[in-house]
Image: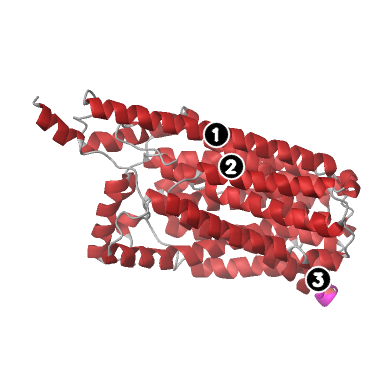
Amino acid sequence: MPTSEKSVQCDKVQYAPTFQDNDYPEDRRITRKVDFRLLPILTLLYLLSFLDRSNIGNAKYVLSFLDLDISASAYNTALAIYFVGYVIFEVPSNLILKRFDPQLWLPSLTLTWGIVSICQGLVKNQAGLFDIRFLLGATEAGLFPGVVYVFSVYYQRRQRSWRVAVFFGGAALAGAFGGIFAYAIGLMNGVGGRKGWQWIFILEGILTVAISLIAYFLVPTWSHKAKFLTEEERVHLLDRLRVDSDAGTNQTFQWSSVRQAFGDHLVWAYAFLFHGFSFVLYSLSFFLPTIIADLGFATWQAQLMTVPPNTLASISIWGTVWLSSRWNLRAPFIIGAALVAIIGYIILLTCTTPGLQYFGIHLATAGVYTGNSLLLSWPSENVSGQTKRAVAVALQITIGDIAAIAGCLIYRPSLSAHLYRKPNLIAIGYLLFAIFATCYLWIMMAWENRRRQMLLAEGTVGCCETEEVKVRLGDRSIHYTYQL
Protein backbone atom coordinates (compact mmCIF):
# COMPACT_ATOMS: atom_id res chain seq x y z
CA MET A 1 0.00 0.00 0.00
CA PRO A 2 1.46 3.46 -0.84
CA THR A 3 2.47 5.56 2.12
CA SER A 4 0.13 8.40 1.24
CA GLU A 5 -2.87 6.05 1.05
CA LYS A 6 -1.93 4.47 4.37
CA SER A 7 -1.69 7.89 5.99
CA VAL A 8 -5.12 8.88 4.75
CA GLN A 9 -6.65 5.74 6.24
CA CYS A 10 -4.83 6.15 9.52
CA ASP A 11 -6.17 9.68 9.90
CA LYS A 12 -9.67 8.27 10.38
CA VAL A 13 -9.26 7.85 14.10
CA GLN A 14 -11.43 8.52 17.07
CA TYR A 15 -10.07 11.72 18.52
CA ALA A 16 -9.63 12.75 22.11
CA PRO A 17 -12.52 15.14 22.75
CA THR A 18 -11.78 18.72 23.76
CA PHE A 19 -13.86 21.43 25.37
CA GLN A 20 -14.20 23.36 22.11
CA ASP A 21 -15.37 20.44 19.92
CA ASN A 22 -18.77 20.72 18.21
CA ASP A 23 -19.35 24.20 19.64
CA TYR A 24 -21.66 25.24 16.81
CA PRO A 25 -25.01 26.99 17.41
CA GLU A 26 -27.02 23.96 16.27
CA ASP A 27 -25.05 21.65 18.58
CA ARG A 28 -25.51 23.97 21.53
CA ARG A 29 -29.22 24.29 20.84
CA ILE A 30 -29.76 20.52 20.73
CA THR A 31 -27.60 20.01 23.84
CA ARG A 32 -29.68 22.58 25.73
CA LYS A 33 -32.84 20.82 24.63
CA VAL A 34 -31.48 17.50 25.91
CA ASP A 35 -30.37 19.17 29.15
CA PHE A 36 -33.81 20.64 29.82
CA ARG A 37 -35.43 17.25 29.27
CA LEU A 38 -32.98 15.07 31.22
CA LEU A 39 -31.37 17.06 34.01
CA PRO A 40 -34.30 18.53 35.98
CA ILE A 41 -36.35 15.35 36.33
CA LEU A 42 -33.42 12.93 36.78
CA THR A 43 -31.70 15.21 39.31
CA LEU A 44 -34.98 15.49 41.21
CA LEU A 45 -35.34 11.69 41.27
CA TYR A 46 -31.85 11.28 42.69
CA LEU A 47 -32.44 14.00 45.28
CA LEU A 48 -35.49 12.05 46.42
CA SER A 49 -33.51 8.81 46.39
CA PHE A 50 -30.76 10.21 48.59
CA LEU A 51 -33.30 11.89 50.85
CA ASP A 52 -35.26 8.67 51.34
CA ARG A 53 -32.17 6.62 52.17
CA SER A 54 -30.51 9.15 54.50
CA ASN A 55 -33.54 10.55 56.36
CA ILE A 56 -33.18 7.70 58.83
CA GLY A 57 -30.21 9.63 60.24
CA ASN A 58 -32.45 12.62 60.93
CA ALA A 59 -35.23 10.43 62.33
CA LYS A 60 -32.83 8.59 64.63
CA TYR A 61 -31.16 11.58 66.16
CA VAL A 62 -33.66 14.41 66.42
CA LEU A 63 -36.77 12.40 67.22
CA SER A 64 -37.91 9.43 69.30
CA PHE A 65 -37.04 6.90 66.62
CA LEU A 66 -35.57 4.50 69.16
CA ASP A 67 -38.92 4.10 70.92
CA LEU A 68 -39.36 1.00 68.74
CA ASP A 69 -37.07 -0.80 71.16
CA ILE A 70 -34.31 -0.60 68.57
CA SER A 71 -30.86 -0.73 70.10
CA ALA A 72 -28.23 1.75 69.01
CA SER A 73 -26.15 -1.02 67.44
CA ALA A 74 -29.21 -2.36 65.61
CA TYR A 75 -29.60 1.07 64.05
CA ASN A 76 -26.17 0.67 62.45
CA THR A 77 -27.19 -2.79 61.25
CA ALA A 78 -30.30 -1.31 59.63
CA LEU A 79 -28.10 1.16 57.75
CA ALA A 80 -25.85 -1.65 56.53
CA ILE A 81 -28.76 -3.86 55.45
CA TYR A 82 -29.90 -1.13 53.07
CA PHE A 83 -26.62 -1.44 51.16
CA VAL A 84 -26.84 -5.23 51.04
CA GLY A 85 -30.00 -4.89 48.96
CA TYR A 86 -28.39 -2.09 46.97
CA VAL A 87 -25.28 -4.11 46.11
CA ILE A 88 -27.19 -7.25 45.13
CA PHE A 89 -29.58 -5.58 42.69
CA GLU A 90 -27.44 -2.94 40.96
CA VAL A 91 -25.94 -4.92 38.09
CA PRO A 92 -29.19 -6.86 37.40
CA SER A 93 -31.10 -3.57 37.34
CA ASN A 94 -28.81 -2.05 34.71
CA LEU A 95 -29.03 -5.20 32.61
CA ILE A 96 -32.84 -4.90 32.73
CA LEU A 97 -32.57 -1.23 31.78
CA LYS A 98 -30.38 -2.07 28.80
CA ARG A 99 -32.90 -4.63 27.55
CA PHE A 100 -35.99 -2.46 28.10
CA ASP A 101 -36.69 1.29 28.34
CA PRO A 102 -35.60 3.99 30.85
CA GLN A 103 -38.91 5.81 30.31
CA LEU A 104 -40.69 2.98 32.12
CA TRP A 105 -37.97 1.45 34.26
CA LEU A 106 -36.66 4.53 36.12
CA PRO A 107 -40.08 5.96 37.14
CA SER A 108 -41.21 2.46 38.16
CA LEU A 109 -38.20 2.15 40.46
CA THR A 110 -39.03 5.55 41.93
CA LEU A 111 -42.67 4.62 42.51
CA THR A 112 -41.67 1.37 44.20
CA TRP A 113 -39.10 2.84 46.59
CA GLY A 114 -41.51 5.70 47.40
CA ILE A 115 -44.05 3.15 48.60
CA VAL A 116 -41.32 1.35 50.57
CA SER A 117 -40.25 4.65 52.10
CA ILE A 118 -43.79 5.29 53.31
CA CYS A 119 -43.76 1.84 54.89
CA GLN A 120 -40.68 2.84 56.92
CA GLY A 121 -42.99 5.11 58.89
CA LEU A 122 -45.25 2.17 59.70
CA VAL A 123 -42.72 -0.30 61.12
CA LYS A 124 -43.46 -1.62 64.60
CA ASN A 125 -40.27 -3.39 65.59
CA GLN A 126 -36.62 -4.05 64.81
CA ALA A 127 -37.27 -6.95 62.42
CA GLY A 128 -39.68 -4.81 60.41
CA LEU A 129 -37.07 -2.06 60.16
CA PHE A 130 -34.45 -4.51 58.86
CA ASP A 131 -36.84 -5.90 56.24
CA ILE A 132 -37.94 -2.52 54.97
CA ARG A 133 -34.39 -1.16 54.74
CA PHE A 134 -33.36 -4.14 52.60
CA LEU A 135 -36.32 -3.51 50.29
CA LEU A 136 -35.47 0.18 50.08
CA GLY A 137 -31.91 -0.65 49.00
CA ALA A 138 -33.12 -3.17 46.42
CA THR A 139 -35.62 -0.74 44.86
CA GLU A 140 -33.27 2.27 44.81
CA ALA A 141 -30.32 0.29 43.43
CA GLY A 142 -31.03 0.86 39.76
CA LEU A 143 -31.51 4.62 39.69
CA PHE A 144 -27.99 6.03 39.87
CA PRO A 145 -26.23 3.60 37.51
CA GLY A 146 -29.27 3.72 35.23
CA VAL A 147 -29.19 7.49 34.93
CA VAL A 148 -25.43 7.58 34.35
CA TYR A 149 -25.92 5.04 31.57
CA VAL A 150 -28.74 7.11 30.02
CA PHE A 151 -26.43 10.14 30.04
CA SER A 152 -23.89 8.07 28.12
CA VAL A 153 -26.26 7.64 25.16
CA TYR A 154 -27.24 11.33 24.99
CA TYR A 155 -23.97 13.18 25.60
CA GLN A 156 -20.47 13.18 24.20
CA ARG A 157 -17.76 11.91 26.50
CA ARG A 158 -16.48 15.40 27.34
CA GLN A 159 -20.01 16.52 28.24
CA ARG A 160 -20.90 13.74 30.69
CA SER A 161 -18.91 14.74 33.78
CA TRP A 162 -20.67 18.10 34.07
CA ARG A 163 -24.10 16.48 33.72
CA VAL A 164 -23.29 13.79 36.26
CA ALA A 165 -22.05 16.55 38.58
CA VAL A 166 -25.32 18.45 38.29
CA PHE A 167 -27.17 15.21 38.88
CA PHE A 168 -25.00 14.15 41.83
CA GLY A 169 -25.35 17.61 43.30
CA GLY A 170 -28.85 16.42 44.19
CA ALA A 171 -27.25 14.23 46.86
CA ALA A 172 -25.61 17.20 48.54
CA LEU A 173 -28.81 19.22 48.27
CA ALA A 174 -30.70 16.30 49.79
CA GLY A 175 -28.38 16.53 52.77
CA ALA A 176 -29.08 20.25 53.06
CA PHE A 177 -32.84 19.95 52.65
CA GLY A 178 -33.02 16.83 54.81
CA GLY A 179 -31.96 18.70 57.92
CA ILE A 180 -34.51 21.45 57.32
CA PHE A 181 -37.29 18.94 56.54
CA ALA A 182 -36.50 16.87 59.62
CA TYR A 183 -36.66 19.91 61.85
CA ALA A 184 -39.95 21.11 60.34
CA ILE A 185 -41.65 17.72 60.15
CA GLY A 186 -40.48 16.92 63.67
CA LEU A 187 -42.89 19.60 64.88
CA MET A 188 -45.72 17.28 63.76
CA ASN A 189 -44.92 14.92 66.61
CA GLY A 190 -48.27 13.59 67.88
CA VAL A 191 -50.34 14.68 64.85
CA GLY A 192 -52.73 11.90 63.86
CA GLY A 193 -51.45 9.80 66.73
CA ARG A 194 -48.08 9.32 65.01
CA LYS A 195 -44.58 10.22 66.13
CA GLY A 196 -42.52 12.85 64.37
CA TRP A 197 -40.05 10.27 63.02
CA GLN A 198 -42.97 8.44 61.35
CA TRP A 199 -44.09 11.61 59.59
CA ILE A 200 -40.58 12.11 58.18
CA PHE A 201 -40.75 8.77 56.36
CA ILE A 202 -44.43 9.02 55.40
CA LEU A 203 -44.45 12.57 54.01
CA GLU A 204 -41.16 12.25 52.15
CA GLY A 205 -42.32 8.89 50.76
CA ILE A 206 -45.61 10.42 49.56
CA LEU A 207 -43.62 13.18 47.83
CA THR A 208 -41.52 10.53 46.04
CA VAL A 209 -44.63 8.64 44.88
CA ALA A 210 -46.21 11.84 43.53
CA ILE A 211 -43.05 12.81 41.62
CA SER A 212 -42.70 9.28 40.22
CA LEU A 213 -46.12 9.51 38.55
CA ILE A 214 -45.09 12.74 36.86
CA ALA A 215 -41.76 11.16 35.88
CA TYR A 216 -43.52 8.67 33.56
CA PHE A 217 -44.25 11.62 31.29
CA LEU A 218 -40.86 13.35 31.61
CA VAL A 219 -38.12 10.69 31.73
CA PRO A 220 -36.90 10.15 28.13
CA THR A 221 -36.47 6.94 26.19
CA TRP A 222 -33.27 5.98 24.33
CA SER A 223 -31.61 8.66 22.21
CA HIS A 224 -32.21 6.84 18.91
CA LYS A 225 -35.99 7.13 19.40
CA ALA A 226 -36.24 10.27 21.56
CA LYS A 227 -39.67 11.80 20.97
CA PHE A 228 -38.82 15.21 22.38
CA LEU A 229 -36.43 15.76 19.45
CA THR A 230 -37.49 16.27 15.86
CA GLU A 231 -36.33 13.73 13.30
CA GLU A 232 -33.72 16.18 12.03
CA GLU A 233 -32.48 16.93 15.54
CA ARG A 234 -32.31 13.24 16.40
CA VAL A 235 -30.24 12.45 13.30
CA HIS A 236 -27.94 15.38 14.02
CA LEU A 237 -27.47 14.26 17.64
CA LEU A 238 -26.71 10.66 16.68
CA ASP A 239 -24.29 11.71 13.95
CA ARG A 240 -22.41 13.88 16.42
CA LEU A 241 -22.31 11.08 19.00
CA ARG A 242 -20.97 8.56 16.45
CA VAL A 243 -17.95 10.79 15.83
CA ASP A 244 -17.14 10.77 19.53
CA SER A 245 -18.11 7.30 20.80
CA ASP A 246 -20.59 4.45 20.43
CA ALA A 247 -23.43 6.51 21.92
CA GLY A 248 -24.95 7.20 18.52
CA THR A 249 -25.36 3.51 17.66
CA ASN A 250 -28.20 1.21 18.59
CA GLN A 251 -26.39 -1.81 20.06
CA THR A 252 -28.17 -4.92 21.22
CA PHE A 253 -27.51 -6.65 24.52
CA GLN A 254 -24.62 -9.16 24.35
CA TRP A 255 -23.37 -11.51 27.06
CA SER A 256 -19.86 -11.33 25.60
CA SER A 257 -19.78 -7.63 26.54
CA VAL A 258 -20.76 -8.55 30.09
CA ARG A 259 -17.77 -10.90 30.25
CA GLN A 260 -15.51 -8.18 28.83
CA ALA A 261 -16.56 -5.80 31.58
CA PHE A 262 -15.76 -8.29 34.33
CA GLY A 263 -12.41 -9.09 32.70
CA ASP A 264 -11.20 -5.47 32.29
CA HIS A 265 -8.74 -4.31 34.97
CA LEU A 266 -9.72 -0.67 34.40
CA VAL A 267 -13.37 -1.45 35.14
CA TRP A 268 -12.32 -2.95 38.46
CA ALA A 269 -10.09 0.05 39.17
CA TYR A 270 -13.08 2.40 38.73
CA ALA A 271 -14.98 0.20 41.16
CA PHE A 272 -12.20 0.26 43.77
CA LEU A 273 -11.88 4.02 43.36
CA PHE A 274 -15.52 4.47 44.34
CA HIS A 275 -15.00 1.92 47.10
CA GLY A 276 -12.54 4.34 48.69
CA PHE A 277 -14.86 7.33 48.41
CA SER A 278 -18.09 5.50 49.23
CA PHE A 279 -17.02 4.77 52.81
CA VAL A 280 -16.70 8.48 53.58
CA LEU A 281 -19.68 9.55 51.46
CA TYR A 282 -22.23 7.48 53.35
CA SER A 283 -20.67 7.72 56.78
CA LEU A 284 -20.93 11.50 56.43
CA SER A 285 -24.47 11.46 55.08
CA PHE A 286 -25.74 9.15 57.83
CA PHE A 287 -23.72 10.34 60.82
CA LEU A 288 -23.21 14.05 60.14
CA PRO A 289 -26.05 15.15 62.50
CA THR A 290 -24.58 12.99 65.26
CA ILE A 291 -21.03 14.30 64.72
CA ILE A 292 -22.22 17.92 64.80
CA ALA A 293 -24.34 17.32 67.91
CA ASP A 294 -21.36 15.74 69.64
CA LEU A 295 -19.45 18.99 69.12
CA GLY A 296 -21.73 20.38 71.81
CA PHE A 297 -24.71 21.66 69.85
CA ALA A 298 -28.35 20.90 70.66
CA THR A 299 -30.15 18.31 68.55
CA TRP A 300 -32.29 20.87 66.74
CA GLN A 301 -29.19 22.95 66.03
CA ALA A 302 -27.37 19.87 64.71
CA GLN A 303 -30.10 19.31 62.13
CA LEU A 304 -29.94 22.88 60.85
CA MET A 305 -26.14 22.94 60.99
CA THR A 306 -25.95 20.13 58.44
CA VAL A 307 -27.21 22.63 55.85
CA PRO A 308 -24.06 24.82 55.39
CA PRO A 309 -21.55 21.97 54.75
CA ASN A 310 -23.92 20.27 52.32
CA THR A 311 -24.58 23.56 50.53
CA LEU A 312 -20.83 24.17 50.27
CA ALA A 313 -20.49 20.66 48.84
CA SER A 314 -22.97 21.47 46.06
CA ILE A 315 -21.10 24.65 45.15
CA SER A 316 -17.78 22.80 45.23
CA ILE A 317 -19.13 20.05 42.99
CA TRP A 318 -20.33 22.39 40.27
CA GLY A 319 -17.30 24.68 40.37
CA THR A 320 -14.70 21.89 40.35
CA VAL A 321 -16.39 19.83 37.67
CA TRP A 322 -16.71 22.91 35.46
CA LEU A 323 -12.94 23.40 35.73
CA SER A 324 -12.39 19.69 35.13
CA SER A 325 -14.46 19.88 31.94
CA ARG A 326 -12.74 23.09 30.88
CA TRP A 327 -9.30 21.48 31.15
CA ASN A 328 -10.53 18.06 30.06
CA LEU A 329 -8.98 16.30 33.07
CA ARG A 330 -10.47 14.13 35.81
CA ALA A 331 -7.68 12.40 37.74
CA PRO A 332 -5.89 15.44 39.26
CA PHE A 333 -9.18 16.92 40.44
CA ILE A 334 -10.24 13.64 42.08
CA ILE A 335 -6.89 13.48 43.89
CA GLY A 336 -7.26 17.13 44.92
CA ALA A 337 -10.76 16.53 46.28
CA ALA A 338 -9.50 13.57 48.33
CA LEU A 339 -6.69 15.68 49.78
CA VAL A 340 -9.14 18.44 50.78
CA ALA A 341 -11.30 15.82 52.53
CA ILE A 342 -8.25 14.39 54.33
CA ILE A 343 -7.31 17.86 55.58
CA GLY A 344 -10.88 18.26 56.84
CA TYR A 345 -10.70 14.99 58.77
CA ILE A 346 -7.32 15.93 60.24
CA ILE A 347 -8.75 19.25 61.50
CA LEU A 348 -11.72 17.40 62.99
CA LEU A 349 -9.39 14.94 64.73
CA THR A 350 -6.69 17.29 66.00
CA CYS A 351 -8.51 20.50 66.92
CA THR A 352 -10.39 20.93 70.18
CA THR A 353 -12.38 24.06 69.35
CA PRO A 354 -15.91 23.30 68.06
CA GLY A 355 -15.68 26.12 65.53
CA LEU A 356 -12.52 24.72 63.94
CA GLN A 357 -13.90 21.19 64.04
CA TYR A 358 -17.05 22.42 62.30
CA PHE A 359 -14.80 24.03 59.65
CA GLY A 360 -13.09 20.65 59.22
CA ILE A 361 -16.51 19.10 58.61
CA HIS A 362 -17.07 21.63 55.81
CA LEU A 363 -13.80 20.67 54.13
CA ALA A 364 -14.43 16.95 54.51
CA THR A 365 -17.96 17.19 53.11
CA ALA A 366 -16.92 19.37 50.16
CA GLY A 367 -13.99 17.11 49.27
CA VAL A 368 -15.92 13.87 49.59
CA TYR A 369 -18.92 14.96 47.52
CA THR A 370 -16.76 16.64 44.86
CA GLY A 371 -14.55 13.59 44.42
CA ASN A 372 -17.57 11.34 44.09
CA SER A 373 -19.18 13.56 41.47
CA LEU A 374 -16.05 13.34 39.31
CA LEU A 375 -15.29 9.64 39.64
CA LEU A 376 -18.85 8.46 39.03
CA SER A 377 -18.84 9.84 35.49
CA TRP A 378 -15.40 8.45 34.62
CA PRO A 379 -16.43 4.92 33.52
CA SER A 380 -19.19 6.31 31.30
CA GLU A 381 -16.54 8.39 29.52
CA ASN A 382 -13.98 5.61 29.10
CA VAL A 383 -15.82 2.30 28.73
CA SER A 384 -17.07 1.74 25.20
CA GLY A 385 -19.52 -0.89 24.08
CA GLN A 386 -22.96 -0.09 25.43
CA THR A 387 -23.58 -3.33 27.30
CA LYS A 388 -20.06 -3.30 28.70
CA ARG A 389 -20.56 0.28 29.86
CA ALA A 390 -23.89 -0.56 31.50
CA VAL A 391 -22.18 -3.33 33.48
CA ALA A 392 -19.13 -1.19 34.30
CA VAL A 393 -21.22 1.67 35.68
CA ALA A 394 -23.30 -0.71 37.82
CA LEU A 395 -20.25 -2.70 38.97
CA GLN A 396 -18.57 0.51 40.10
CA ILE A 397 -21.50 1.31 42.39
CA THR A 398 -21.79 -2.30 43.56
CA ILE A 399 -18.17 -2.64 44.67
CA GLY A 400 -18.16 0.90 46.00
CA ASP A 401 -21.17 0.40 48.21
CA ILE A 402 -19.58 -2.57 49.94
CA ALA A 403 -17.49 0.10 51.67
CA ALA A 404 -20.72 1.86 52.63
CA ILE A 405 -21.73 -1.30 54.50
CA ALA A 406 -18.40 -1.19 56.33
CA GLY A 407 -18.90 2.49 57.17
CA CYS A 408 -22.33 1.85 58.67
CA LEU A 409 -20.89 -0.85 60.93
CA ILE A 410 -17.62 0.89 61.88
CA TYR A 411 -19.26 4.14 63.00
CA ARG A 412 -20.56 2.44 66.16
CA PRO A 413 -22.55 4.38 68.78
CA SER A 414 -19.97 3.60 71.47
CA LEU A 415 -17.41 5.67 69.54
CA SER A 416 -19.53 8.80 69.08
CA ALA A 417 -18.47 10.25 72.45
CA HIS A 418 -14.96 10.64 71.01
CA LEU A 419 -16.22 12.19 67.74
CA TYR A 420 -15.73 8.82 66.01
CA ARG A 421 -11.96 9.20 66.23
CA LYS A 422 -11.07 5.68 65.09
CA PRO A 423 -13.67 5.59 62.28
CA ASN A 424 -12.44 8.97 61.05
CA LEU A 425 -8.88 7.66 60.95
CA ILE A 426 -10.16 4.72 58.90
CA ALA A 427 -11.91 7.22 56.62
CA ILE A 428 -8.55 8.86 55.93
CA GLY A 429 -7.17 5.42 55.03
CA TYR A 430 -10.01 4.88 52.57
CA LEU A 431 -9.32 8.26 50.95
CA LEU A 432 -5.63 7.37 50.59
CA PHE A 433 -6.70 4.11 48.94
CA ALA A 434 -8.89 6.15 46.54
CA ILE A 435 -5.89 8.32 45.66
CA PHE A 436 -3.89 5.17 44.87
CA ALA A 437 -6.69 3.85 42.62
CA THR A 438 -6.88 7.22 40.82
CA CYS A 439 -3.13 7.20 40.21
CA TYR A 440 -3.34 3.64 38.85
CA LEU A 441 -6.07 4.62 36.39
CA TRP A 442 -4.27 7.80 35.37
CA ILE A 443 -0.94 6.06 34.74
CA MET A 444 -2.37 3.01 32.96
CA MET A 445 -4.68 4.98 30.65
CA ALA A 446 -2.00 7.55 29.83
CA TRP A 447 0.42 4.73 29.01
CA GLU A 448 -2.16 3.01 26.80
CA ASN A 449 -2.97 6.26 24.99
CA ARG A 450 0.72 6.81 24.21
CA ARG A 451 1.13 3.21 23.07
CA ARG A 452 -1.79 3.46 20.67
CA GLN A 453 -0.62 6.80 19.31
CA MET A 454 2.83 5.35 18.60
CA LEU A 455 1.35 2.33 16.80
CA LEU A 456 -0.91 4.55 14.72
CA ALA A 457 1.99 6.83 13.88
CA GLU A 458 3.99 3.83 12.68
CA GLY A 459 1.04 2.83 10.50
CA THR A 460 1.51 -0.87 11.21
CA VAL A 461 -1.82 -1.64 12.87
CA GLY A 462 -5.35 -0.32 12.95
CA CYS A 463 -5.38 1.37 9.60
CA CYS A 464 -7.87 -1.07 8.12
CA GLU A 465 -10.37 -1.02 10.96
CA THR A 466 -13.84 -0.31 9.61
CA GLU A 467 -16.41 1.66 11.59
CA GLU A 468 -18.20 -1.63 12.30
CA VAL A 469 -15.02 -3.13 13.75
CA LYS A 470 -14.36 -0.03 15.85
CA VAL A 471 -17.84 -0.21 17.35
CA ARG A 472 -17.46 -3.94 18.04
CA LEU A 473 -14.06 -3.48 19.72
CA GLY A 474 -15.19 -0.43 21.71
CA ASP A 475 -12.49 0.81 24.07
CA ARG A 476 -10.22 -2.03 22.92
CA SER A 477 -9.89 -0.41 19.49
CA ILE A 478 -6.50 1.12 18.84
CA HIS A 479 -8.30 4.27 17.72
CA TYR A 480 -9.95 4.74 21.11
CA THR A 481 -8.50 7.47 23.35
CA TYR A 482 -9.05 7.33 27.10
CA GLN A 483 -10.27 10.38 28.96
CA LEU A 484 -7.74 11.19 31.70
Q: Which mark is residue 283?
A: none
Q: Residue 147's x, y, as percent? A: 48, 54
The quadrant holding residue 296 is bottom right
The quadrant holding residue 414 is top right
Please say whether residue 300 is visible from this viewpoint.
yes
Q: Residue 189's x, y, as percent? A: 84, 72
Please say whether residue 267 is visible from this viewpoint.
no
Q: Earlier in the sequence, mark 2 or mark 1?
A: 2
Towards the viewer: 246 or 226: 246
Towards the viewer: 170 or 483: 483
Q: Residue 325's x, y, as percent? A: 45, 53
In this view, 66 is above or below 4: below
Q: Looking at the picture, which amino acid does disc 1 mark?
A: Cys
At 76% from the left edge and 68% from the top edge, which residue is drawn?
182
At 53% from the left edge and 31% from the top edge, which residue is drawn?
440
Residue at mark 2: 335
In the displayed structure, does residue 119 sit left or right of residue 212? right
Residue at mark 3: 186
Q: Secondary structure at mark 2?
A: helix
Query: Are circles 2 and 1 on residues that touch, CB within 8 Å?
Result: yes
Q: Secondary structure at mark 3?
A: helix
Query: Are circles 2 and 3 on residues that touch, CB within 8 Å?
Result: no
Circle 1 Cα neighbour tier, 10 Å, few/some/many (<14 / 14–19 / ≥20): some
Q: Earlier in the sequence, mark 3 or mark 1?
A: 3
In this view, 476 is above or below 226: above
Q: Earlier in the sequence, mark 2 or mark 3?
A: 3
Q: Looking at the picture, which amino acid does disc 3 mark?
A: Gly
Quarter holding the C terminus is top left
Residue at mark 1: 439
- Separation of residues labelled 3 and 1 (CA atoms): 45 Å
Query: What is the span of residues highlighted in magenta in the rendered image?
Result: 186-192
